[in-house]
Each structure stands twice: as structure tokens, then as C-alpha cells.
Amino acid sequence: MTIRTDHQPYVQAAVAEIEEIGLSVLGHAVTGRPPAVRTAVVTLAVPESGPYADEDEDIELAWDEAFGWVLRLPAEAGATDWFMGEDLVPSPGRVARWADMVLAHPGLTPSREDGPQRLPESDDDAFEARLSAYAASA
């Protein structure tokens, strides 16, 4: 049986990178400690410029172990989910650059529209090792 890694160090590393590039993080929550489904939500302030500058509500950047990173962006019908891609544990710097690009120029990157990349209950040593790397460096 695979030992499930705490995802908090990975999420904290992503938050640090997001702040480093100049996006304003209002807060973040890490939920679903193992053995539950691991999730996190990073709340971002509305950008000062760009297509979302006039929005009234904060923007959510969420992560879970099945889908990876997703920006929940304001839309006419409520919100739309903008999925990052197939890598479930991309580098924190890549997460920050992607979020910044989508908020400034959403037309430059497509949203992945398929299903989950893995099942949360899967024994996946490679996935756990990638998350563990952030715990070791914290």
C-alpha cells in the first residue's frame, strides 16, 4: 500500500510563487488530509488590469489530486472552470505563470476539458514521490 503524502507543502510552494510573480493571494485552505481526497483552494484578489479587472468577486485557484489545477473564473452564467493541463503536480513556478497568463490573456491557453487524470484512491508511487519532494524541501 502506498503511503499518501500531505499536499500542504506543495500548495504552500505554489502560493509563494504566485505571490512572487505579483498576484495578490488573499488566503488559501488545504483540505482533505490523507486518506481523504486531497484538495486546496487559493483565493486571489481580482487583478488590477486585464479582462477580469472589473469583477466583483475574488478568483479561486483550486487543486485536487484527480484534476490538478483549475482557475474558477467569473462568467456570465456564474463561473467557468479553466483547467491547467495533464500534469497533476506541475512546478509551483509553472502554476504561478499559468495563472498569471490566464488572468491576463485567457485566449492564449486552452482549458483541458477531459476527465480526471487519476483516481484519488489509486496507489501511485510516482505521484506521491512528486508531492513528497515539496515536504522534504519545506
Image (cartoon, helix red, strand yellow):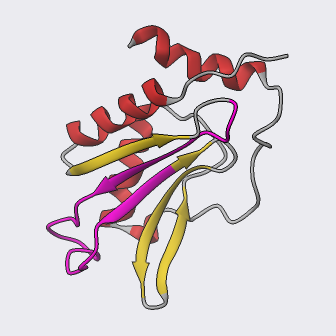
Q: Position of residue 45 (x, y in %)?
A: 22, 61
- x 51%, y 75%: residue: 80
Examine the rendered structure and indicate whether residue 44 appears above or below residue 128. Answer: below
Farthest residue, direction left: 48
Q: Position of residue 49 (x, y in %)?
A: 17, 70
Majority secondary structure in the magenta region: loop
Query: Is residue 14 left or right of 81 when viewed as pictured?
Result: left
For residue 53, what is the image quadrant? bottom left
Between 3 and 35, the one nearer to me in the picture: 35
Examine the rendered structure and indicate whether residue 71 appears above or below residue 8. Answer: below
In which quadrant will I find the C terminus? Answer: top left
Query: Is residue 62 left or right of 104 when viewed as pictured?
Result: right
Magenta stretch: residue 69 in it?
no
In which quadrant will I find the N terminus? Answer: top right
Q: Position of residue 35 (x, y in %)?
A: 70, 31
- x 29%, y 42%: residue: 18
Examine the rendered structure and indicate whether residue 2 appears above or below residue 46. Answer: above
Q: Position of residue 63 (x, y in %)?
A: 53, 47
| Total tally of numbered discs in the picture | 0
Farthest residue, direction bottom: 76
Between 117 and 28, the one nearer to me in the picture: 28
User: Which range of residues does the magenta coloring cover?
Assistant: 35-62
- x 28%, y 33%: residue: 16
Examine the rendered structure and indicate whether residue 12 appears above or below residue 25. Answer: above
Query: Is residue 47 left or right of 102 when viewed as pictured?
Result: left
